[in-house]
């Protein structure tokens, strides 16, 4: 065998070994090596419903690499209790799972008890994402469910904090779910269907986030409420489109969604901006009217 042939065989063998090592690293087959592909998951940070709603649903959105994996969740009572039965709500601990390539969201739904007792305006409980598998990374794992008491005879409104999750998928997506009794506040541009969901969006695209205004009980007439955004780490015009407007709440609904546009620059480093509601007409009042919209790149 010539020297040239020996060198060629050595080169081919080395190349094959390098390819095998790279493949092993990519799949986590080497001892002590972690899989390079992890899906990001984020739960709604806050979800509020009227006590009469029947159900309260958290959406767990997913972004980044669509790896196979799972995450568990645990439920913790706060001022809202599960015992003694029937309590204020019913929800057991559980687990969520994804197959490889699955980019759809998951939902965790609590049953809400309409007990006809005058209680604190907002009673809460927590849902926490825990014990992610190797293919899952929890980027926002704490969710607060809030039950808006409807037995006091007072008309009250609140708003929820939300998350917008960056995705490295092939196309932008907004995971949506209808919230009973809520409508979309008309705006200058068409908006997506109403949803409690956090938004999942591919960086480089505008995210059309729907910010909720929730009522404890419907009004018999149309009423209005002031909705304003303000800067936090993120800045209007650069990271989001500012909203300052009077929002109409149609009669016999339990709230509305207001469209807020999150701009591509917000996904560069992430951060948050603020939402504030005020001046609820018709003799109503605002309870905990400040919230945050957080962008996770």
Image: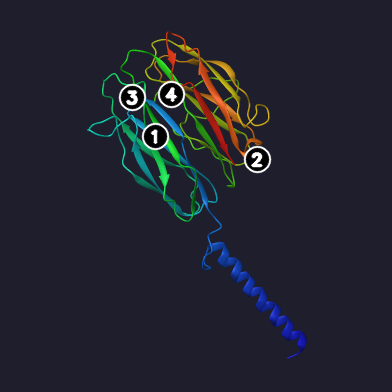
Q: Quadrant of the C terminus?
A: top right
Please identify, in this view, whether the residue under mark 4 or under mark 3 is nearer the observer: 3
Q: Earlier in the sequence, mark 4 or mark 2?
A: 4
Q: Earlier in the sequence, mark 1 or mark 3?
A: 3
Specify few, some or many for label 3: CA neighbours under 10 Å numbering under 14, 14-19, or 20 or more: many
Q: Distance of mark 2 from mark 3, alpha carbons?
A: 39 Å
Q: Earlier in the sequence, mark 1 or mark 2?
A: 1
Q: Write down the residue under mark 3.
A: 51
Q: Earlier in the sequence, mark 4 or mark 3?
A: 3
Q: Write down the residue under mark 2.
A: 268
Give the SS element for disc 1.
strand
Question: Can you say whether 166 is above or below 277 in the image?
Answer: below
Determine which of the numbered discs, if any, sits on residue 182 in the image: 4
Q: Distance of mark 4 from mark 3, alpha carbons?
A: 14 Å
Going by the picture, which residue comes out furthest to the left?
85
Question: Can you say whether 151 is above or below 126 in the image?
Answer: above
Please identify, in this view, whether the residue under mark 1 or under mark 4 is nearer the observer: 1
Q: Where's residue 121, x and y in %?
A: 36, 20
Residue 98 seen in render:
no
Q: Where's residue 12, x and y in %?
A: 68, 77
């Amino acid at each position: 065998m010539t020297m040239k042939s020996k060198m060629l065989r050595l080169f081919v063998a080395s190349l094959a070994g390098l390819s095998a090592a790279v493949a092993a690293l990519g799949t986590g087959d080497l001892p002590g090596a972690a899989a390079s592909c992890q899906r990001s998951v984020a739960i709604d940070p806050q979800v509020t419903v009227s006590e009469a709603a029947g159900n309260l649903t958290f959406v767990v959105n997913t972004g980044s690499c669509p790896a196979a994996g799972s995450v568990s969740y645990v439920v913790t009572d706060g001022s809202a209790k599960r015992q003694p039965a029937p309590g204020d709500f019913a929800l057991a601990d559980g687990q969520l799972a994804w197959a490889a390539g699955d980019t759809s969201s998951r939902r965790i739904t609590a049953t809400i008890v309409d007990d006809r007792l005058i209680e604190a305006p907002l009673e809460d409980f927590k849902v926490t994402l825990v014990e992610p598998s190797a293919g899952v990374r929890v980027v926002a794992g704490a969710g607060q469910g809030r039950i808006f008491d409807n037995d006091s005879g007072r008309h009250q409104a609140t708003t929820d904090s939300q998350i917008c999750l960056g995705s490295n998928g092939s196309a932008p997506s907004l995971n949506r779910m209808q919230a009973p009794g809520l409508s979309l506040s008309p705006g200058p541009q068409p908006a997506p269907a109403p949803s409690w969901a956090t938004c999942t969006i591919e960086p480089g695209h505008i995210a059309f986030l729907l910010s909720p205004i929730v009522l404890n009980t419907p009004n018999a007439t149309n009423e209005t409420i002031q909705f304003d955004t303000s800067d936090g780490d993120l800045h209007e015009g650069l990271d989001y489109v500012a909203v300052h407007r009077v929002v109409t709440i149609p009669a016999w609904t339990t709230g509305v969604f207001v469209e807020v546009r999150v701009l591509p620059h917000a996904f560069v480093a992430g951060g948050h901006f603020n939402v504030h509601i005020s001046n609820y007409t018709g003799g109503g009042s605002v309870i905990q009217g400040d919230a945050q919209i957080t962008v996770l790149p």
